[in-house]
Amino acid sequence: MAVRSIITGTGSALPPAIVRNADLEEKLDTSDTWIVERTGIRERRIAAPEVKTSDLAVEAAEAAMASAGVGAGDIDLVVVATATPDDTFPATATRVQARLGIRQGAAFDVAAVCSGFVYALTVADALLKTGAHKRALVIGAELFSRILDWEDRTTAVLFGDGAGAVILEARDEDGRGILAARLHADGRHGDLLFVDGGPGSTGTVGKLRMKGREVFRHAVTNLASVVEEVLADAGLEASAIDWIVPHQANARILEATARKLGLPMERVVMTVGQHANTSAASVPLALDQAVRDGRIRPGQLCLLEAMGGGFTWGAVLLRF
Ligand code: UT7
């Protein structure tokens, strides 16, 4: 019987401090009206200075492990998607592994920025299918507040901090699990969304820079085509999708994707208003929220999709 990777638990973590658009109006030449109309963002969470990415990752992981009913001894793969690791190395995944008391298997980070969780889930799925690993902890965790230029209104208002996690388990095929996954990259567009520093260039961490309008245009086109690909791979029509769980960059991108698929917004899990763009954390954060509030139920068809710096983009179609 074929093996499929099934999500058996979800969890998330958000820093307690809420920063509302009105708070940003005091520091930047911006307005709540502009931010809400152009992005749908109303507020975001910002972590206290002493908090590390691994702290949020561990909190989300513990919640996912509890919901799956598994312990440290049951996990043999830890993958953390992040563009804001604790340190340049070791991988944040190894910090998380140690803190959780996981002693077996592998741990590594995936750097695909906002597509990071979709990339990490796809890589974990592939490793589970080889039979080399049995149960993965896949996390998206970010502290984008640390790489923002807080004087640049075109980017500072858009991002937030958070983490989300899933337990992904190899099981004999029963109709559930990851049905199709596709990843893409086009490095020619690296300068449209990037951080202007790093250990191998400036020796500093750097700040996020983005040409938002161009990113927006590519996002709508790339997401539509990768979604078509996973639907075709699985032999399914868009109308079969119960929930779209998209990367939360901009409410208008979410609306455009739903429109292209002919699906109503009621089937889109939208958290951008409360979390803003949390990069690799946004998809698992949205997934966990919709699972916990009872919207996403076992057996439903979910489409996870994301696009981000690189450019990188991808989609995962799964039966929850
Ligand atoms: O997560 C990775 C992927 N990232 C994305 O998908 C982000 C994609 N891009 C976007 O979401 C949108 O392009 C933005 C929200 C970043 C910008 O929205 P836009 O409708 O594309 O606006 P724009 O960049 O074309 O700027 C329109 C105007 C400009 O003024 P002028 O040149 O028309 O006078 C900006 O200077 O809005 C101005 N503006 C602002 N005004 C008030 C830019 N940022 C702000 C701001 N407050 N925070």
Image (spheres, grey):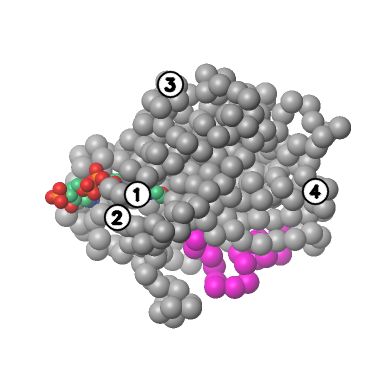
Residue at which label 2 appears: 211
Residue type highlighted by circle 2: Lys
Camera sees residue 288: no
| Amino acid of disc 1 | Val
Question: The magenta stretch spans which residues?
Answer: 83-101
- 264 relative position to 107: left or right: left
Cα distance, mark 3 to mark 4?
A: 36 Å
Name the residue beneath numbered marker 4: 130
- CB at disc 1 and ligand 1 closer than 8 Å: yes
Q: Pick whichever of labels 1 and 4 is earlier in the sequence.
A: 4
Mark 1 touching mark 4, by CB under 8 A? no
Instruction: Determine which quarter of the picture holds residue 98.
Output: bottom right
Is there CB contact under 8 Å for labels 2 and 4? Answer: no
Left or right of residue 263, residue 8 in this image? right
- At horizontal 48% and vertical 24% (from top left) the residue drawn is 267
Front residue of 98 and 220: 220
Q: Quadrant of the N terminus?
A: top right
Q: Position of residue 192 (x, y in %)?
A: 34, 57
Residues at circles 1 and 2 in contact by the CB criterion of under 8 Å: yes
Residue linked to disc 3: 262
Relative height, residue 175 to residue 77 (above, below): above
Q: Residue at x 39, y 25 (%)?
A: 259
Q: Please, which residue is most extreme toward the bottom here?
A: 203
* Residue at left offset 81%, top offset 60%: 104
State the SS at label 1.
Answer: helix
Mark 1 crowd level (few <14, some 14–19, many ≥20, 10 Å Cα):
some
| Residue at 16%, 54% in the rendered image | 29
Whichever of labels 2 and 4 marks the residue nearer the N terminus, that label is: 4
Residue 140: x, y in percent?
Answer: 56, 51
Residue at the far left in the pictured view:
29
According to the image, label 1 marks what residue? Answer: 215
**Where's residue 121, x and y in %?**
63, 46
